[in-house]
Amino acid sequence: MEVLIGDPITTCLSPSVYDIICNLGFQLRENCDINSIVAQNGEVCWKTITDCVSYTESDQGLDYWGSVRLLGPVCEAVHSHFLSLTKGQFEIRYAPWFQWTSFPELFPEIFDALESLQSPAISLSLMKLTSCLERALGDVFLLIGKECPFLLRDLLASVELAQVFGQSVMNVLKVFVGSPCGLNLRNVLWHGFASPEEVPPKYCSMMMLLTAGLGQLLKSYLQKTKLTLAHRSFITPTNLEDLIVFPDVTYEVLSVLEEAMTKSAFILKIMLPYWEVALVKFKSHRFADCAILLLTQLETGLRNVFATLNRCPKRLLTAESTALYTTFDILAKHLNDGKINQLPLFLGEPAMEFLWDFLNHQEGPRIRDHLSHGEINLHEFSKETTNQLLAFSVVLLLRFVDEGLLSVFKEKASVELLISLAEGYSSRCHPVFQLKKQ
């Protein structure tokens, strides 16, 4: 596919975002004593952490860069501390403090990922951690507030959470996940901007410690106020049965995907490890993990095609806080300046309708939204849903391989079937279809 042949892309982070995530937290070389951060029994000493947060001259706002710089050695110490523990020690010391989240069993898995030292597994862990934390913080918000904010950054800025945890603690969270001016770990990962090698594992360790520390603060708040934390039920995505159009992915299709991944211009080389892990997760029946990786990488690949077709290479990079995020709004018919977006024309109606059905239509399952906000039970995520995403990914990747290879793949009946089903797709979540169904 000629459209994507250019210089190999080495990062999707803009220079300042790259700097704050990959360099800034490593500038201070001083050692930080772990005993000043966390006690033997796992109790977090918040003062050591909150003291690292800097404020601007006027004291009105956070100095994000200064804070990331000062927090670097603390994160380093926490990371080394976790790596020095056995899994048993970790569970004895920290497991009780994750119970306030609705997914406490996630944290031993994250511990395993940190120990494995595998970058894609650590990125995936951070994505799941941020969505789990967001859901749990929303539950805490509802102890006092009525309408839980939809965006994590609005949740972290709420008076309600400051009332429970204290403003200085909320400011620490803002540095890590609550603002485009900070590390913004949630967004750079969930929107597919950060390659596996760009996410320092120490930030995953630190987020895990912060989650435990929040559990400790919450416990004393609940004891003091005599309130009880209730977890909202998980959401079951709607109209999924209407969206099952592709048959189960077979071993033959998986082997085509394995080869296409290395040959397709749709996949940025720096992101290939995510695709490889997605396949491993599918084969080991970890369907939610596979779907999370596929969704973020579909966004990365589509953003690359979007930026190329519309001749706006800068839109490939993480937007600065002043600019719009190029997220799945790349599917819109028009660009911000009113010009026609070339991506829908290039992808064609069936592919666009599939993406809209899965991701954007209010009547659809909105899987990416629900997963990224921690609203879906990951253990019960359906194989059928992941199957559809995987099959669609195969068809999409094959549009970006050379003609010779494509004709070889098309000789396989299973591939030919997927392509014809994809080409015949029409919306099942559009209001018109829903009316017909009724």
Image (cartoon, grey):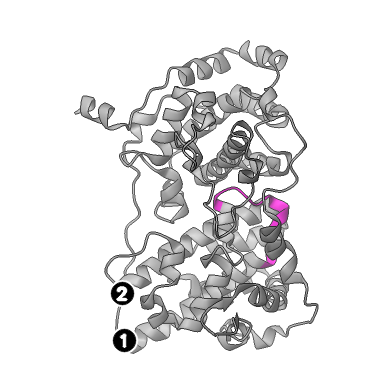
Bin the neighbour count of mark 2 within 10 Å (Cα to Cα): few under 14, some 14-19, many 20 and up: some
Residue 225's label in the rendered image is: 1
Q: Where's residue 19, x and y in %? A: 72, 62
- Residue occupying the point 40% across, 28% down: 244
Q: In terms of image quadrants, where is residue 34?
A: bottom right
What is the residue that sits farthest to the right in this orientation?
Answer: 29
The dot on residue 14 is none
Residue range in magenta is 190-202
Q: Could you tell whether 93 is left or right of 362 in the image?
A: right
Mark 2 touches mark 1? (CB < 8 Å): yes
Is 151 in the magenta? no
Q: Is residue 125 above or below residue 47?
A: above
Residue for point 51% across, 67% down: 178
Residue 405 in the image, given as x and y percentages of width and height: 71, 17
Give the crowd class for mark 1: few <14, some 14-19, many >=20 residues within 10 Å: few
> Badge 2 is on which residue?
143
Q: Is residue 274 or residue 191 the one in the foreground?
A: 191
Three-letter code for the amino acid on which mark 2 is drawn: Leu
Point out the tag, 2 or 1, that comes first from the N-terminus: 2
Distance from disc 2 to disc 1, alpha carbons, whole Å, reads 10 Å
Which residue is depicted at the point 64% across and 83% down? 52
Q: Of residues 306 and 227, which is closer to you in this image?
A: 306
Element marked by disc 2? helix
